[in-house]
Amino acid sequence: MEPTLVSDKPRTADEAEASPRPQYADRMQERHRCRSRFVLGGLVVLLGVAVGAGLAVGAVGISPGQVLAILGDRVGVSLPWEFERRQALVLTSIRLPRVLLAIGVGGGLAVSGALMQGLFRNPLADPSLIGVSSGAALAAVVTIVLGSTVFGAWSDVLGAFLLPAAAFTGGVVATFIVYRLATREGQTSVTTMLLAGIAINALAAAGTGLMIFIADDDQLRDLTFWTLGSVGGATWTRLAVVGPCLLGGMLAAPLLARPLNALLLGESEAGHLGIRTEQVKKVVITLAALVVGAAVAVSGVIGFIGLVVPHLLRLAVGPDHRILIPGSALLGGGLLLGADLLARTIVAPAELPIGIVTALVGAPFFLWLLLRDRNRGTGYSF
């Protein structure tokens, strides 16, 4: 039997089109697009169900029909379901702003996590790596313990807005310090940024511990609840203050999808593709600091949302940030909304700090990821 020789003659255009390889690639891309659309559609439905449950379930029972009737009444539409005035007040003054704040905070934290994981090129990165959460926490703790002493007349001027304003400022300042420490001659080292973030987190933790040590009993209760997170203080006024930061950050983040996809190849490769890597780093860090700072300012420190949500979506739809970022906003909002529903109903009439619920869900998932990758013989490195 004569051996089959491989011809060196280049293939014609017709032969190339008839090759199964491009057809296979097209089929795979179509399957990925279909799966991505299916996942995003499912997340929209999931978020809608979570919103309905968040509005209807609570100490004051409100049926789905009554929810629609109350909301319709606010815009001048009459629906056939009867409702009481108390139910309308609870829905519009307490539950609706709380639901919207949970969606904004959860979506903002998840989107920030996706941005940081893309910047560090590591799926185990978290927004807290750049010190924004710990900086905001330290500023808030100082405000609770030493507010009238440190801020003086500002405490009377700002009133209830003093704590959110201080937390937001602390988060942004901590992020700026980390960024300046990691930048030299116009170049920002991601590794140095990580190490500087660890150092700032440690210093902020020490300062927080000192404030807890000198706090009285009433302040300790506030500190404990605030550092574990809650959206129970949601009001329309607070939502109007932080809403633009949260919503603006989530709307601006998809614009960074293409540069982050290029950064997955490495900084030098992204530069060859025309990506201004230093500018991308500045924008990502600034956007994450603004969103996380605003979220922490009104809800306290809520862990694992920024870590778990992008990683879970990456397992489902891959690393494409064009899908990952909007999917993170949807899943993050739905997940935090579900966690808040559990937090305010599982030990009713008391309320469980929402950070406990997210940790109970996120920590086992994180350990499962580590064990799975250890068994596969793979791991993550910065």
Image: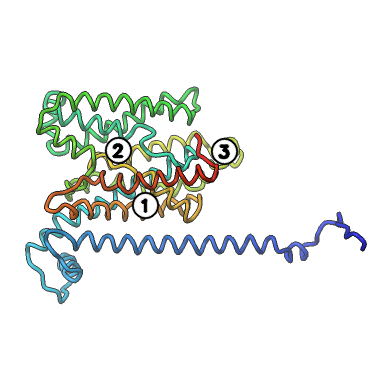
Q: Reading the chain from its start, which is encountered first: label 2 or label 1?
A: 2
Residue occupied by mark 3 = 266
Left or right side of 374 for 5: right
Looking at the image, which is closer to me, 136 or 46? 46
* Residue type pointed to by label 2: Gly
Identity of the residue drawn at 54% across and 42% down: 378
Residue 246 spot, x, y in % from top left: 31, 46
Identity of the residue drawn at 11% across and 63% down: 88
The secondary element bearing badge 2 is classed as helix
Residue 23 spot, x, y in % from top left: 66, 64
Residue occupied by mark 2 = 293
Which quadrant of the rendered structure holds the N terminus?
A: bottom right
- Mark 2 neighbour class, 10 Å CA radius: few under 14, some 14 to 19, many 20 or more: many
Per the rendering, the mark at residue 329 is: 1
Q: Is residue 207 above or below residue 287?
A: above
* Residue type pointed to by label 1: Ala
Identity of the residue drawn at 23% across and 62% down: 53
Q: Reading the chain from its start, which is encountered first: label 3 or label 2?
A: 3
